[in-house]
Image (cartoon, rainbow, N blue to C red):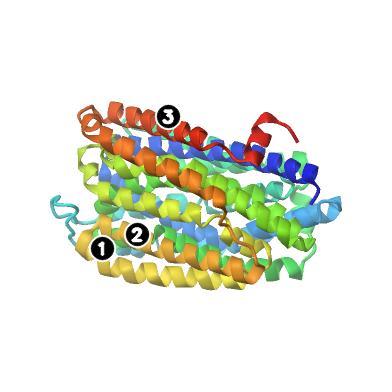
Amino acid sequence: MNRNRSSSRNALIAGQAGISYGGFIFGQAVRFGFNMAVARMLGEESLGVYALALAVMQIVETFGVAGYDAAAVRYVNIYQAEGRKASDAAGLAIRSALLMSLVPALLVMLFSAPLARLLGGGASLDVGGSAPLGGDGGGTLLHFALLSYAVAVPFNVAATVAGHALQGHRDLVPKIVATQIIAPVAMLALTLLLAFADAPGPALLVPYTAASVLSCLWIWRQLRLKTGTGIREVLGAPADRRMKAFAFPLLGVSLVSMIAYWLDVLLLGMLGGPVLSGLYQPAARTAGLLRAVLPAFSGIAAPLVAALQAGDESAETGRLYRLVTRWMVLLVTPATVFLMVLPEPVLLLFGPRFSASAPALVLLAAAAFAQAFGGIAGTVLSMAGHGRVTFLNALVGFAVQVALSVLLIPLYGTAGAAAASLGAMLLLSALRLLQVSRVLGVSSFSGALWKPAAAGVGTAVLLWLCRPWLLGLGPAASALTGVVIASAGYLALTLLFRLEAEDRELILGKH
């Protein structure tokens, strides 16, 4: 591999992933603020209703997307030199996904009432010593939330596939702007406006759908301007059996993965009602800040891996794989340490009752780190054409999570749900790492990984020594000071251990 080409690819990954990661962090931070606003202004039951309705919609949207997001990335990238063919690939992916999304969206509308009763179950569970929860489960509010959010499904599906089509052109910015800036900012702004206008019902029901429409319209315009793909291309794109054969196995992977992602929230609702899901949601959303690192890097790595595999460049695939894994671990370690050592101040920002979910946040942070350490193994397998392997992995992980959830949630509430997620993620990451090594002959492990590991251990010790003093501060001051200490300590140790040569080369701009 030519050194200049390799350095150029490093710069592309760092630049696009930096934009993507920054966008994801911004979007997650705004959603963090949205959850906090709902918790403080509308109450934990409303937050639980939002979490349950969102879980259903994201599962439905994943079914609608049907693997055509990944297909758009792969085939738009492959056909990029043949302008018309790339535009047809994007149009076919959008049309197929839109048609797939209509059926489940309509089914949710038709069966929203029984679905609300199922998810708003009235079983009483105790959470970390808190009072028993349950009651009527907020079924009426959840019913209307499901109806309202289902309207957004086609818009979100179209926006997702259009964003991935642009990603196939190696341009992540439009997708990030649509999904991580326009949608969450519009949601938060509308929620605050309606809440201050003393309209709690509309404040929960309207913002999600309105924000979805806005983000879809924006990214559709970007797709048309940047690639020429418009309504004519969507309606007239010829069928492509290769795209369909590639997409459908990934539908299974994505669907099982999304159900597994929301399984804890759904089961908590079924067993304890929306209040229990609401108490868990801040921990899940906070840990979601760590999970942002994976889509940020896999987004730009996916088309690169697809191109390398098409050119039979296994050695360069391995180098790219190890590089991205190291960067992901380097970024996610300090935040993981902070959340595992100081979960209470973060959750107290949502209100006093939410601190009971501190053990859940510790476990979810560990699960997010396991996902990052697993690197982009799943993406590498998918882009190399091993969709069936990734589907079987997802099924195994899902089965383990279901079994652990059913066993642990009745015993430990939110902590049990988080422990089930951690167990499933550890198994799934191990499977993916082993398979990439055996099937493709590449490994994510490199000697340089000891540096972020050692820096993380040192930062954890420092933060633990400061913990008694930090907990004596108010929640906001404690969280902010803890972030500063963790960041400064980790940065100092990382510099002490010295950056890798290719990292220094990238930062200094010498190719």
**Residue 102 placed where, x, y %?**
57, 60
Crowd class of label 3 (few under 14; some 14 to 19; many from 20; radius 10 Å): some
Task: Name the mark nearer the viewer: 3 or 1.
Answer: 3
What separation in Å lies between label 2 and label 1 (alpha carbons)?
9 Å
**Residue 451 placed where, x, y %?**
50, 44
Report whether 256 appears left or right of 160. left
Comparing 292 with 88, the one in front is 292
Residue type at tag 2: Asp
What separation in Å lies between label 2 and label 3 (alpha carbons)?
34 Å
Q: In terms of image quadrants, where is residue 488?
A: top left
Mark 3, residue position: 488
**Residue 276 placed where, x, y %?**
25, 53
SS state under label 2? helix
> Are dots 2 and 3 in contact, CB under 8 Å?
no
> Are dots 2 and 1 in contact, CB under 8 Å?
yes
Mark 2, residue position: 264
The mark that comes first in sequence, 2 or 1, is 2
Numbered mark located on residue 363 in the image: none
**Residue 181 placed where, x, y %?**
54, 35
Q: What residue do we see at 58% from left, 72% from top?
A: 389
The mark that comes first in sequence, 3 or 1, is 1
Residue type at tag 3: Ala
Comparing 237 with 383, the one in front is 383
The mark that comes first in sequence, 2 or 3, is 2
Q: What residue do we see at 44% from left, 63% from top?
A: 259
What separation in Å lies between label 3 and label 1 (alpha carbons)?
37 Å
Numbered mark located on residue 409 in the image: 1
Report whether 207 appears left or right of 170. left
Residue 182 visible, this angle: no
Residue type at tag 1: Ile
